Image (tube, rainbow, N blue to C red):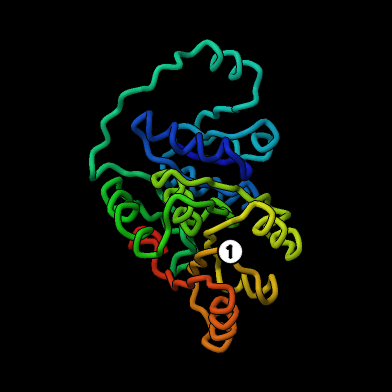
Amino acid sequence: VGVCLDRGADLVVAVLAVWKAGAAYVPIDPGQPVERIAYMLGDSRAVLTVTSAEIADELPAGRGRMLVLDDAFTVMRLSLASAERPVRRLIGDQSAYVIYTSGSTGRPKGVVVTQAALANYVGSVPGRLGLDGGRFALVQGQATDLGNTVVFAALTLGGELHIVAEGAATDPEALRAVLAGRGIDFVKMVPSHLAAMGPGLLPGRSLVLGGEAAASDWLEQVLANADVRGCAVFNHYGPTETTIG
């Protein structure tokens, strides 16, 4: 099931709903080129795409059914649906999601992550990173697996998940205001993204770096600032094939 939504609570709810239905999700950034979106939906054999009315108009035609969350008919159907929790037993080797990377040939490459791999990750890695039931900020887009660390840690550890708007995530002052104003404890960022935000931008407790390698001289500056602030720093960079990098 393709999930093509703007950042927000609906995005997280859609992921959980896909799993409740016993399916796997394919995260799609609405800002990606139409050709890439069409390829991912076709290659993954998505039978349905969850989206919004504004985004649906820009999506490629002929790539399966669409569930438009803010469509009047959809809203009516959902209002009549049962509120009872669906019982669905997930199997370990069942697919949880498919992440598309750039691929060595330039063509997007789908990486399938299983429920067992994700469960093992969530059960061990957040604890090793010092994450617990605090306040988590999601600042990355949904097309990569980078942000899954904070999303699933927050949901499984009883934390608060704060989804930062795209405009604020790329504005140094706005992002500083979010981290400070909301008392954010944990954030995960790509090193180049953090570097572009300027020095001293840190959460209250733990900064996790991932998605790409970090330059040693820049990292020394980050560590010095973090030491003064009492913020732990973790390097969590690895391939999507190892579940989350």
How many discs appear? 1
Give the residue furthest to the top.
Answer: 80
- In the displayed structure, would residue 135 be above or below residue 48? below
Is label 1 in a helix, a strand or a loop? Answer: loop
For residue 62, what is the image quadrant? top right
- In the displayed structure, would residue 15 be above or below residue 137? above
Q: Which residue is mark 1?
A: 203
Identify the residue at horizontal 61%, vertical 41% (top origin). 8
Identify the residue at horizontal 38%, vertical 58% (top origin). 126
Give the residue furthest to the bottom.
Answer: 217
Give the residue type that dot 1 points to. Pro
Quadrant assignment for the N terminus: top left
Q: Who is closer to the viewer here, 200 or 13? A: 200
Give the residue furthest to the left.
Answer: 92
Q: Is 151 positioned to the left or the right of 36 in the image? A: left
Identify the residue at horizontal 72%, vertical 55% (top origin). 168
Q: Is 124 positioned to the left or the right of 170 in the image? A: left
Q: Who is closer to the viewer here, 141 or 26? A: 141
- In the displayed structure, would residue 211 be above or below residue 149? below
Q: Who is closer to the viewer here, 126 or 65? A: 126
Residue 156 percent across, percent down from the top left: 39, 45
- In the displayed structure, would residue 169 be above or below residue 3? below
Q: Residues within 10 Å of mark 1 (few under 14, many from 20)?
A: many
Residue 192 percent across, percent down from the top left: 60, 73
Residue 206 percent across, percent down from the top left: 50, 65
Identify the residue at horizontal 39%, vertical 61% (top origin). 240
Residue 103 percent across, percent down from the top left: 45, 65
Quadrant assignment for the C terminus: bottom left
